[in-house]
Amino acid sequence: MTDLRIVENPAGEAAERLAAAADAGEQIALTGGSTARRMYERLATMAVDWSGCTLWFGDERCVPPEDERSNFGMVRDALLDRLPGSAPDMRRIVGERGPDAGAADYERRLQDDFGQAMPRFDLLLLGLGSDGHCASIFPGDRALEERERLAVGVPRSGLPPWVSRVTLTLPVLNAARQVIFLVTGADKAEAAARAFAGRPDRRTPASLVAPVAGTLTVLIDRAAAERLPT
C-alpha cells in the first residue's frame, strides 16, 4: 500500500522524518538529487543528534568524492560539513574504484554490518528519474534482474550524467522498514503516474519498489502529481 502525499515542500517533510530517524540511532540510506540536496541543507539547520545513526547510500556515481557529480560529495557539502556537533557514522560507496570493484566493496561492508541476513534499513530515501528509474536501477538494465547480490555495478547510465555507477539492488530496497520517495517538478509527472498509479512494470523500475514488510511513502509536489488520478 502506497501512502502518497501531495505536499508543498517534500524536502522539508522528508527532513523531519530523517531527523527523527537520526535521533533514534537508525540505519539510513540516502539519495542524491536536487530535492534531496534541499533536504540536507534543511537538516543542517536543525537540532539533530547524529551520533548514534549510520548513513549509507542507495547509489553512487563512479567518480571521486571531490567531483561535483558525487552523491557523497553533495551530502558532505550540504550537510556533513555544516554540522556543529558530532557527525554520523558514514558508509560511503567508494565509486572511484569503478562499478564492479566499488559494488563488491560496498557489498562486503553491508555484510560486515548486517551479517549474512538481507540488510534492512530503517529508512531508505529514493528519488525518481524522468525515465522512471530509482537509485541507479534504469529501465532495461541488468540490475533489474539481480536477486542475489546486495549491490551491483551499472556500467552505463540511462540518463545524464553519463558515468558508470554502483547501486543497491531491488531486494535490498524492498527489505527496508520505511521507504520514502522524494518527487518534485513537472518533468517527473509522467514517470510518477507510471510508478505510483500503474501496475509494476520493468519499464519503470520505481514501480517495482514495494517493501515486503515495511511502508512506502511518496512525498510529491503538485507539479509532479499533475497526472496522478484524483
Image (tube, rainbow, N blue to C red):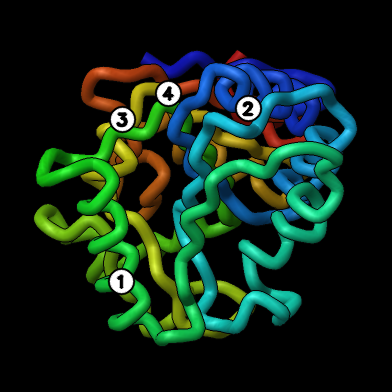
* Position of residue 16 in the picture relative to residue 114 (left or right): right
- Which amino acid lies under the numbered mark 1 shown in the image of this protein? Asp
Q: Name the secondary structure under disc 2.
A: helix
- Which amino acid lies under the numbered mark 2 shown in the image of this protein? Leu
As rendered, which of 183 and 199 lies closer to the eye? 183
The residue at the point 10 percent across, 56 percent down is: 148
As rendered, which of 183 and 173 lies closer to the eye? 173
- Mark 3 or mark 4, which is nearer to you? 4
Residue 10 location, x and y as percent? 74, 28
> How many angstroms separate mark 2 from mark 3 (CA)?
20 Å
Q: Which residue is mark 3?
A: 210
- Which amino acid lies under the numbered mark 4 shown in the image of this protein? Gln
Disc 2 packing (10 Å; few <14; some 14–19; many ≥20): many
Q: Earlier in the sequence, mark 4 or mark 2?
A: 2
Disc 3 packing (10 Å; few <14; some 14–19; many ≥20): many
Q: Name the secondary structure under disc 4.
A: strand
Q: Earlier in the sequence, mark 3 or mark 1?
A: 1
Q: Which residue is mark 2?
A: 18
Q: Earlier in the sequence, mark 1 or mark 4?
A: 1
* Position of residue 150 in the picture relative to residue 216 (left or right): left
> How many angstroms separate mark 1 from mark 4 (CA)?
25 Å
Do the residues bearing badges 1 and 4 touch, measured as CB atoms within 8 Å?
A: no
Residue 105 circle label = 1
Disc 1 packing (10 Å; few <14; some 14–19; many ≥20): some
Do the residues bearing badges 2 and 1 touch, measured as CB atoms within 8 Å?
A: no
Q: Which residue is mark 4?
A: 178
- Which amino acid lies under the numbered mark 3 shown in the image of this protein? Ala
Residue 186 visible in rendering: no
